[in-house]
Image (cartoon, grey):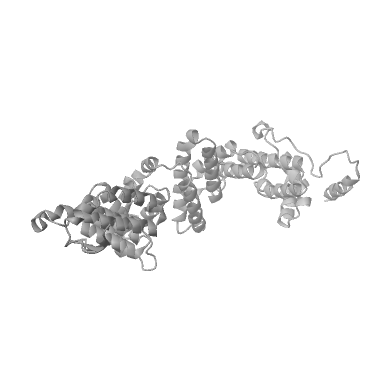
Amino acid sequence: MKKTLFVIALCATLPLMAANTTMSCIPSHKSAGVSADDEPEPTISDECRKNVSLFHENVRAKQFEIAYEPWMTVYTECPNVNKSVYTDGAKIVDYFYAKAKAENNKEEMTRLANLALEMCDKRIKYFGDDPKYPAAYILGEKGLEYIEHFPEDELKTNAYGWLKESISGLQSGSKITVLVEFFKLSYGLYRSNPNQYAEQFIADYTMVNSYLTTIAENPKSKNASAAEQNKGFVDEMFATSGAADCEKMDQLYASYVETNGQNLEKMLNLMSLYKRVNCTESEVYFAAAEKVHQMQPTEESAAGCAKMCYKKEDWKGALKYYQEAVSLIEEADDEDKDDYYYMMALIQMDKLKNYPEARNYARMSLEANPNMGRCYILIGMCYAGTKPYSQAEYGAKAAILNKTVYWAAVDQFIKAKEVDPSCAADANQLIASYSKYFPTKEERFDLPNDFSGTVFIVGGWINERTYIR
């Protein structure tokens, strides 16, 4: 203890030294560049054990200034005595690093950062076979130390390697921090060179996601909640990375659906991920949606099955599932209803040529969202594609009367751009195209009884009021 007090007193006198003399109050130690494997097996003495007790008690009391000297003596002379040399040592180094950082002492910060890494190497050498904290665990700690203390190294490829080796060894027993930081490093590598690291990034995501899922689903794990939260963060980063194109996603998850197809939560999470990466037209998404719909029909699973049927040109099946999606929407959340009705209208018009039903669904979509300009365009296309006047009933007049549908169609195109400016370009093009087919003045002159006023009602199933032009 007298020796300790002497060192403290010596440190107190340092500010009185000449200004051009640079010294540290922390005793020097071996360079971090020296490999722990080069050191001979140390001898553990009674003095060593005494110092262990001394620094351990001071660390517990947060007396890091006092703990440093006995700790450094043990670390230098008998680093194999007890793993507290490293667990307590990490706290001591963290304390002095924070102090050096507050003083903006770059040289001291670098020295301490290297010391932290060196400690991990020595701990692996002497305690790497510890059953609870083996070498793989220590490598994870080394990677975290590097990330914290060397921020200027943007890619941190060495830390990436240490963390990957740690995860490979511990798998779902890895620390959540190690899993997340490893994935962030992988993302950084991918961003630096997408062509080189895309495949590696996807593989890393698959591994990290799998282990986080395992931890989150373990009811006995005290980290289950944290794993679930961090899994969401990892999923979101992956979804927005740009690496997840639909073909690669399907390669990753095709077998996942086969293996976990009866797990509702896993299938819902997979669908959610596919939705975030905009891959809802993929076969795996459809397969997951079908599995979910069998177990617990939801709006999203019904819509997924509808898209699957649409892609397979099963129009009746698509209509059935879109109708189910509408029925499964909660009253407080009907933001997708207009889209579902629009898709039903589109199928009826474009695939089944059932124009009256197409208009019915388009009008339902407009009830849900009056600003759906594309619905007015669809109705106008239905009008333009039909001939409500038969020659059998109207004779020679039928050909001219059927041209009146273009007045009604153009009315719908005008409404489309009025309610939705984003439709203006398409609407104007359609107006220009179909206006050319209006009945001419001469044709109207031949039908005086049908054109006695400016208002005209287009007949047949259309039954739409328009005006003569």
Left or right position of 84 against 314:
right
Name the residue furthest top. Answer: 38
- Say above or below: 400 vs 455: above
* Residue 160 in view (yes/no): yes
Left or right position of 102 against 336:
right
Instruction: State the count of labels.
Output: 0
At 48% across and 55% down in the image, what residue appears? 228
Task: Using the image as rendered, state which of residue 395 and residue 315 is in the foreground.
Answer: 395
At 43% across and 43% down in the image, what residue appears? 244
Name the residue furthest left. Answer: 392
Task: Using the image as rendered, state which of residue 284 and residue 459 is in the foreground.
Answer: 459
In the picture, the quarter occupied by the C terminus is bottom left
At 27% across and 53% down in the image, what residue appears? 381
**Residue 83 horizontal/vertical position (percent):** 64, 46
Left or right position of 6 against 242:
right
Left or right position of 113 against 175:
right
**Residue 344 horizontal/vertical position (percent):** 27, 56
Task: Using the image as rendered, state which of residue 114 and residue 313 is in the foreground.
Answer: 313
- Say above or below: 381 vs 170: below
**Residue 277 horizontal/vertical position (percent):** 42, 48
**Residue 465 horizontal/vertical position (percent):** 25, 64
- Say above or below: 107 vs 298: above
* Residue 129 in view (yes/no): no
